[in-house]
Image (cartoon, grey):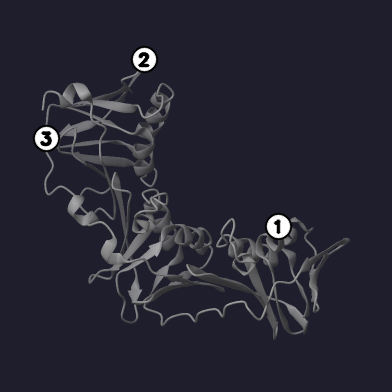
Amino acid sequence: MKLTVEQAELAEAARWVARHIPPSAADPTALAVLLDADGDALTVAYNSVETAASVTVDAHVLTPGRAAVSGKIFADIVGALPPVPVDLAGDESGVDVVGGANTFRLGLLDTAAYPALPPMPPISGTVPAILFASAVANVAVAVDAAVAALPELGGIRIRPETDGHLTFTATDRYRVAVQRIPWQPADDAVTALLPGRALVDIAKTAGSADHVDLALTGRAAGIQAGRRTSVSRLLSVDKFPNADAAFPTEYTATVTCDADELAATVKRISLLLEGDQAVELAIVRDHMTLQALRNPRATGAARIDCRLDGADTFDVAFNPRYLLDGLAPIDGDVAIDLTTHARPALIHADINHPTYQYLVVPVRDPAKAAKT
């Protein structure tokens, strides 16, 4: 294998593929990337039980060939090289990486034992890349990757709707994040539950493409954005919590205010919080007062304008991080639908046609709980 490739393109490709590599593995092959030089291109690829990813970049290939090298080290090296053409030359014992006056040699892993990349499944439809990236980012805050007993909580569900939309959903049982985006279906598609961490890594760079091709099949999900392709195994969608049932059928009150102002105020009050303490919203018709709940060592309050419909007063408390996560995607006014101080509250922007919804369980105030 012998070729020349632009440093910036190679570094970006290697960095993106390396995001899919786990921190450690018993088998060194699980930490390797495959370099495949052929024709006028170089493909950098990774394959594991959970996901496969590949990026193709233009290259001047003098000698075609394949080589498997440590993925993290390769990405770090090419990322640290100066912005000059990079020469890659491989033989039976290793691969030389040369950029300007910098020369590195990487040992080979067993190329013959490297698992074959799965093919991209048939395309189910197309979605604008920027919408895909924002949808994944908006719901990913509710992914719970730490629950080993139920891996499905670490997934993001993508459900094709009959009205030409895709619905992205994630939940950690304390909150449910939902985002709807339009798409152009082209073939059969099924509801798929993808590993959240892998999907987030894919979406981070998908926005640079014009569109994303999605393959939602019963066995795997394929995502293609530009010259980047990812094929992911599916989690069991049947084991995903029934997040839709968590949404109340009716609400007793709705408070509307400026999302940025509320978020900034929550951050200021959060300076007083320790551990799992909450921020309390004491809401009346035309304003709300935010204060730290159950902190005997520090007190403070901040007031912002709002509009409360359906009730004269309403007190509710939230985990500040959960509240901020729900506010982050919203520009302008935010509406918070309320039932009781202990039942889930719904955060959204457009009251009539919400495409983004964030359901969050309040923190119960023991003083109020004793009265119920």
Query: Given contact means CB atoms under 8 Å apart, are the residues at marks 2 and 3 in contact?
Result: no
- Residue 33 drawn above or below residue 340: below
Q: In the image, residue 299 lies at what x, y percent?
A: 36, 15
As helix, strand or loop, the secondary structure at mark 3 comes to loop
Q: Which mark is residue 76?
A: 1
Q: Quick check: can you spot residue 214?
A: no
Quarter of the rendering occupied by the C terminus: top left
Residue 81 lies left or right of residue 225; in this view the side is right
The amino acid marked with disc number 3 is Gly
- Tag nearer the camera, 3 or 1: 1
Q: Quick check: can you spot residue 164?
A: yes
Q: Residue at x 29, y 44 (%)?
A: 174
How far apart in space, not on screen, are marks 2 and 3 (Cα)?
Answer: 30 Å
Indicate the quadrant where residue 284 lies.
top left
Quarter of the rendering occupied by the N terminus: bottom right
Task: Categorize mark 3 by other alpha carbons within 10 Å: few (<14), some (14-19), many (20+).
Answer: some
Residue on which disc 2 sits: 299
Residue 244 lies left or right of residue 300; in this view the side is left
The amino acid marked with disc number 2 is Thr
As helix, strand or loop, the secondary structure at mark 2 comes to loop
Residue on which disc 3 sits: 310
Q: Residue at x 34, y 59 (%)?
A: 152
